[in-house]
Structure formats: structure tokens, C-alpha cells
Image: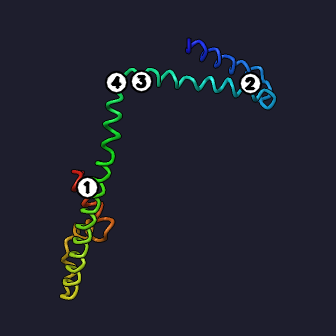
Amino acid sequence: WLDTILVISSLSDLFIFLIGVNVASAGRALRVIRLLRLARTVRIVRTLRSVREFHKMVYALLSSMRTLMCSMLILTFVIFFFGVVFVQGVTEYRQDRFGQGTSDLIHPGILEFFGNLPVTFFALFLVASDG
């Protein structure tokens, strides 16, 4: 029943478009026809209401989002803390080496991964996410 109404509304909209009726003059009728086309979503919602497992999965996903966000926030703070510690350590190491005149002996990976805070943060994220 609903499918028949949807097909008729789509065909009438197509017919009005092919005839070339002025949209301004037929605006109200076209709005009603287009609103009937939105009834397709009702069919999808009606189908999903009968699927109990789908409701359970959606509820589980929505319920776990708060816990996931809290975990991601804590992980971000831990990575940031260790990033600051590592950048500070590398900076002090470079200053000590520079004072001794042996700054060219610094391993290139130290500056590549721990030279500044954004790069260090990204490197620690890669380590934590096995990337």
C-alpha cells in the first residue's frame, strides 16, 4: 500500500518535471508531492522497529560512547604528559651536548621523533596505537 503511494508520487513528480510546469505556480502541489516522497523513510523505520537485535546494538553503541570518550581523553592526557617529559629531556640533552661542543653526535632519530611537542605527541600516539 505504501509502495504504491510512493511510486505514484514519484511518477507524478517526474511527469510535472517533464511537462515543464512553472514551479512557482504549482509550488503548493509540488510540496505535497515531495512530502509524500519523504514517506519512504517511514517504511525503513517501520521495518527496523521489528528488528529487536538492531535496537540492542544501537543502544549498546550509544551507551558505550561516554566510556569511550573518557578513555580517549585519559589516553590523550597521558600521551601529552609523556610528550612534554620527552621533549624536555631531549632539549636538556641537546643543551648539555652543545655546551660541551659535541652537538653533532646527537642521534638523528631523537630530533626526528622528539624534536618538538606535536611531533612527539604523534610519535607517542603511533606507539600506543601500534602504528
Point out the tag, 1 or 2, that comes first from the N-terminus.
2
| Foreground of the two, 83 or 103 | 83
| Foreground of the two, 52 or 105 | 52
Point out the tag, 2 or 4, that comes first from the N-terminus.
2
- Which residue does the numbered mark 3 point to in the structure image? 48
Residue 29 marker: 2
Q: Looking at the rendering, which quadrant does residue 12 occupy?
A: top right
Q: Is residue 59 above or below residue 101?
A: above
Secondary structure of the residue carrying tag 4 is: helix
Q: Position of residue 37 (x, y in %)?
A: 61, 23
Amino acid of disc 3: Leu
Task: State which mark lies toward you, 2 or 4.
Answer: 4
Q: Position of residue 70 (x, y in %)?
A: 30, 53
Relative placement, left or right, of 116 versus 1 is: left
Q: Residue at x 22, y 85 (%)?
A: 98
Amino acid of disc 2: Ala
